């Protein structure tokens, strides 16, 4: 198995009809980069930076953040490293959450992620300074979480620009042309993905939240877990719209939610045109094998049939039997 895995690491994630896909890793702490290497990821598609903030009772300062980001970026050499800015709040709480303004009635719909950062501009700026300084060590991409519309993206980008200017004035070197992308994980972002695509360098679909918000199902509540369905026609249509809008604007569409790492969905995602799959490192070899054994033509035909079905049960049956037969 080890030998098989090593052989697979050297082979590209290419379909039978020649489409090259990008397989990237999700990480939470810098120590995970070894596993990223050994499973053949061609970059990091999601580094959840909030874990640096959740592990201690005080906020990490600029130097501590710079060290962590630099470590990951250097270790990955020239391969892309996508670092997501703070996604605190909701189910990700910090020890010093008094900073966060107390208990919320609906934290999942509340003051989290980019919303939290845009109202704590000092914390956001410090993180962006650390990220930009670390950018000289390799190939950094910056990604904003939970963007819900154009206005929020404009505000985040304005702060990003201002921090860049500030560093340049201080003669601190930063990389040129650092891509700034967004997570698509709020239904209003999916619905306005044509507009958002014009202002983003890439999309990464966060299905964990997108499914939760689109189907109105708390992703952590066991009583409604049976309704949490990536194959719901509402989700598949939403994914199609997001990916099509990304491509119309000439940017790439990736996915870093759990759906990207589940082999049951690989054919659907290929058929919808997804360009980049990001998942836990350990899942990469299996997804690569599926990609290498199929063609885009076949995947598109498959999705065409799925899009015509109206019942989630029928879709689940169809998808499971097809995937079983194939792999
Ligand atoms: C997601 O929502 O799909 C995602 C990748 O982000 P997180 O799970 O950290 O909210
Ligand atoms: Mg999310």
Image (tube, rainbow, N blue to C red):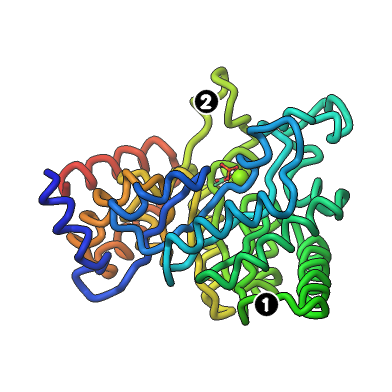
Identified at 48% across, 63% down, the residue is 74
Would residue 192 be visible to someone looking at this image?
A: yes
Element on which disc 1 rests? loop
Mark 1 burial class by Cα count in 10 Å: few <14, some 14-19, many 20+:
some
Between 207 and 97, the residue placed more toward the observer is: 97
Q: Residue at x 55, y 67 (%)?
A: 140
From the viewer's perspective, is 10 left or right of 26?
A: left
Q: Which residue is mark 2?
A: 225
Closest to the camera, between mark 2 and mark 1, is: 1
Q: Residues within 10 Å of mark 2 (few under 14, many from 20)?
A: few
Choose top left, top right, bottom left or bottom right for residue 188.
Answer: bottom right
The image shows residue 225 at horizontal and vertical percentages of: 52, 25
In what element is the residue under mark 2? helix
In the rendered image, the vertical position of residue 288 relative to residue 226, given as above or below: below
User: Within the displayed image, which quadrant is ligand 2 positioned in?
Assistant: top right
Pinpoint residue 325: horizontal percent, then vertical percent.
15, 45
Position of residue 57 measured from the top left corner of the image (x, y, whole percent): 73, 30
Of labels 2 and 1, earlier in sequence is: 1
Q: Is residue 187 visible?
A: no
Q: Nearer the viewer, residue 208 or 7?
A: 7
When asked about the image quadrant of residue 147, the answer is bottom right
Nearest the camera: 64 or 35?
Answer: 64
Q: Is residue 74 left or right of residue 165?
A: left
Q: Position of residue 42 (x, y in %)?
A: 36, 64
Residue under the image location 27 percent in, 70 percent down = 297
Specify whether tag 1 is near ligand 1 (CB below 8 Å).
no
Mark number, residue 201: none
User: Which numbered marker is on residue 173?
Assistant: 1
The residue lying at 52 percent from left, 43 percent from top is 28
- In the image, residue 209 above or below residue 179: above
* Left or right of residue 108: residue 303: left
């Amino acid at each position: 198995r080890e030998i098989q895995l090593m052989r697979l690491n050297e082979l590209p994630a290419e379909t039978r009809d020649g489409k090259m896909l990008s397989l990237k890793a999700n990480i939470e702490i810098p120590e995970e980069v070894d596993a990223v290497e050994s499973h053949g990821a061609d970059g990091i598609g999601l580094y959840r930076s909030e874990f640096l903030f959740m592990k201690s009772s005080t906020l990490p300062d600029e130097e501590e953040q710079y060290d962590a980001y630099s470590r990951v970026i250097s270790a990955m050499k020239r391969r892309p490293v996508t670092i997501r800015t703070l996604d605190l709040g909701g189910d990700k709480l910090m020890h010093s959450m008094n900073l966060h303004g107390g208990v919320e009635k609906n934290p999942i719909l509340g003051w989290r992620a980019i919303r939290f950062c845009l109202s704590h501009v000092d914390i956001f700026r410090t993180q962006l300074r650390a990220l930009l300084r670390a950018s000289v060590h390799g190939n950094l991409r910056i990604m904003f979480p939970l963007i819900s519309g154009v206005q929020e993206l404009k505000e985040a980008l304005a702060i990003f620009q201002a921090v860049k200017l500030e560093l340049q004035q201080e003669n601190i070197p930063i990389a040129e042309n650092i891509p700034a992308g967004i997570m698509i994980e709020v239904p209003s972002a999916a619905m306005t993905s044509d507009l958002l695509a014009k202002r983003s360098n890439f999309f990464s679909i966060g299905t964990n939240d997108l499914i939760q918000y689109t189907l109105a199902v708390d992703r952590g509540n066991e009583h409604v877990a049976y309704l949490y369905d990536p194959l719901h026609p509402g989700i598949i249509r939403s994914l199609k719209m997001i990916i099509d809008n990304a491509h119309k604007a000439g940017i790439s569409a990736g996915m870093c939610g759990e759906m990207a790492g589940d082999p049951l969905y690989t054919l659907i995602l290929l058929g919808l045109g997804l360009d980049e799959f990001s998942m836990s490192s350990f899942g990469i070899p299996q997804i690569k094998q599926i990609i290498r054994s199929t063609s885009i033509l076949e995947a598109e035909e498959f999705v065409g049939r799925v899009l015509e079905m109206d019942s989630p049960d029928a879709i689940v049956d169809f998808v499971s039997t097809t995937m079983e037969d194939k792999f």
